Amino acid sequence: MRIVVAYQWACDPQEALVSSDGKIDFSRAKPTISDYDAVAIEMGCHLAEATGAELIGISAGGEAVATAIATKAALARGLHEVFVVSDPGLDSAGTLATAVTLKAAIDNLGDVGLLLTGDSSLDSGSKTLVAVLAGLLGWPCVTDVMKVTMDGDSLTIERTIPEGIQGLHLHGPVLVGVTSDAVKAKVPGMKDVLSAGKKPARVVSLLDLGVRLPGEGEILSVEKMAGPSRQQIRINTEDPAQAAAELVSALRAAGALDA
Amino acid sequence: MFGLTDEQELIRSSVREFSEAEVAPLAAEIDRDHRPPLETIPKLAELGLLGILIPEQYGGTEMDSVSYCVVIEELSRCCATTGVMVEAHSSLCTWPIVHFGTEEHKQRYLPDLASGVKMGAFGLTEPGAGSDAGALATTARRDGDEFVLNGQKVFITGGGYSEVFIVFARSTEAPGTKGISAFIVDRDTPGFTIGEGERKLGIRGSSTPPLMFSDVRIPATNLLGREGQGFEIAMATLDGGRTGIAAQAVGIAQGAFEAAIDYAQQRVQFGKPLAALQAIQWMIADMATSIDAGRLLVYQAADLEDRGIPHGIAAAQAKLFCGEMASAVAGKAIQIHGGNGYTEAYPVERAYRDAKITEIYEGTSEIQRLVIGRSFLR
Ligand SMILES: Cc1cc2nc3c(=O)[nH]c(=O)nc-3n(C[C@H](O)[C@H](O)[C@H](O)COP(=O)(O)OP(=O)(O)OC[C@H]3O[C@@H](n4cnc5c(N)ncnc54)[C@H](O)[C@@H]3O)c2cc1C
């Protein structure tokens, strides 16, 4: 049986520069494995070690996702191999196109008992992919997962819900969205980095998989919404209690807090 | 050479992630308390950073010199003390054992040095022999199948916690540098004592004590290389070490540069951020350009070493340029911070103090100039 982790290779928004006119400049931000997905990969490593399952990473994107540095970065995190769908058509793919592509990748791999992924997308912050992908696969989808134990195709899962922590038992295949603090993603060690290039990395195109991307509409324009104007509130005191009091009264005066 | 390989880029991002999470949070505290960050040693070992120059068969990660420089640069960007801790251990202790040691030396010492069970240090400098290392006076007298060491070393990086010392001493009557031999000395050898660490201007967390040898008996098999080869071993070791120190200087400068950029964008004077002032932009431009120039000199020296081409002059040039560059860049970073930069509340003050040592140890800037100048005038 295979454990698969879907990961995203994208620019880290924390490294992007926001100019004073609100434009976001990604030119100095280096692409990386999404922090969210790094957690999912780490959880996959623990499960693969405990069960002896194969651990395969899948990713879909434009040319960048198939570069050697992208596949090595994923493999250095402990995946046994990666299967990457790379196509210019996926460069700015939306949720549905990405989900259709990842489904084709899962079908192509076969024998998948568990699909893990981070619970959010790095660049858009969207949380919709897991639900759409599970729908296409016809699999149960469990999000906000903190813990998974596996015994064959039988899974015990702990997830956070508004009331607290929910324990679940179900049979695979299942799609699991992992919370960002479920486990601590290990920093890849030097040996992991140096051996990454020796592990298998398969790169295929949409044509190879026989996938036709669904239409997702055409973006005509993007207009910036003006945010609230700055209130120019200045607090100039060394005393924390005084500063808090001044802040509260300024927020009340601005109508941001109830009087 | 203009680009790093994928592996070198990934090494950079791993070490950066590690340094920001594990090294940076301790940097100000160990500086204030003048204490080595010993709790970081097992973490460095786990990541594979203590066996960088050690072959895999002895438990090392056997990385190339360019990767090694990337590691030292990234550690030093967050904490110059941690940078030199790894640098002295790797360049000055593990490297000479790998290159001049016997199979028995390698099997006995390298696995523990790679796994961080033991740290290593290098004892060349003496009270009367600094730049003029060939004037060292420590003696090693042969007595049967032992050598007996007497003398004193000063300023030994890592001396406070290291277990394995490469020590240079005079073992024959041959004059000048020809009489010098290198030895491996274990910390617990009777007669070997380690003094108090110096309190220093910068890299305050780095332990820099004197070593005292009083009738220290070591087995003759602890001779590293041949008798009389010591000075050659010291100079070859320092060629690699100098590239490492140059990388440390680049890291210190990079850290100060990034702090200056952050500050310039946040601090508002005359109604706009400092970054909007051309005077500040020019400083940023000069800093960025000199850091890049230094980094290229480091990678050039390391790349020559990786390709087995003589790299002593390139290493001297990298160390000379980067040492002076780091001091200048850290000075500009303070200037951009104004009065705040002069206080301990901002990291550029520490960077300025840390940068200065890169102009002094493993050969002062004057000695690098001497080496470079002579090479052109022979
Ligand atoms: C923090 C720290 C860590 C150190 N770590 C180690 C270590 O791990 N192992 C080790 O063996 N040593 C170590 N050292 C010693 C260091 O390498 C020496 O301090 C350095 O080589 C300079 O020697 P010196 O201090 O005796 O200065 P000196 O040699 O006395 O030099 C004083 C000044 O004279 C100049 N000068 C000397 N000779 C010449 C010349 N021929 N031409 C022009 N100018 C000259 C120098 O450049 C310098 O400006 C360390 C030192 C420090 C401060």
Image: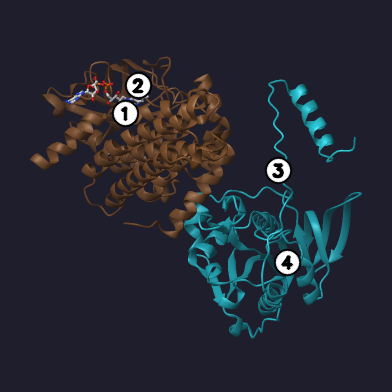
Q: Amino acid at mark 1?
A: Tyr
Chain for numbered disc 2: B
Q: Amino acid at mark 3?
A: Arg
Q: Quadrant of residue A145?
A: bottom right
Residue at mark 4 to residue at mark 2: CA–CA distance: 56 Å
Is residue A254 found left or right of B107 in the rendered image?
A: right
Are the residues flagged by discs 3 and 4 from a single subunit?
Answer: yes
Are the residues flagged by discs 4 and 2 from a single subunit?
Answer: no
The crowd level at tag 2 (other Cα within 10 Å; few <14, some 14-19, many 20+) is many
Disc on the earlier residue, 3 or 4: 4
Query: Helix or strand or loop: what does disc 3 sit on?
Result: loop
Query: Helix or strand or loop: what does disc 4 sit on?
Result: strand
Q: Amino acid at mark 4?
A: Leu
Judging by the rendered image, the residue that carries numbered circle 2 is B155
The location of residue B85, given as percent across then percent down, is 44, 32
Residue at mark 1 to residue at mark 2: CA–CA distance: 9 Å
Chain for numbered disc 1: B
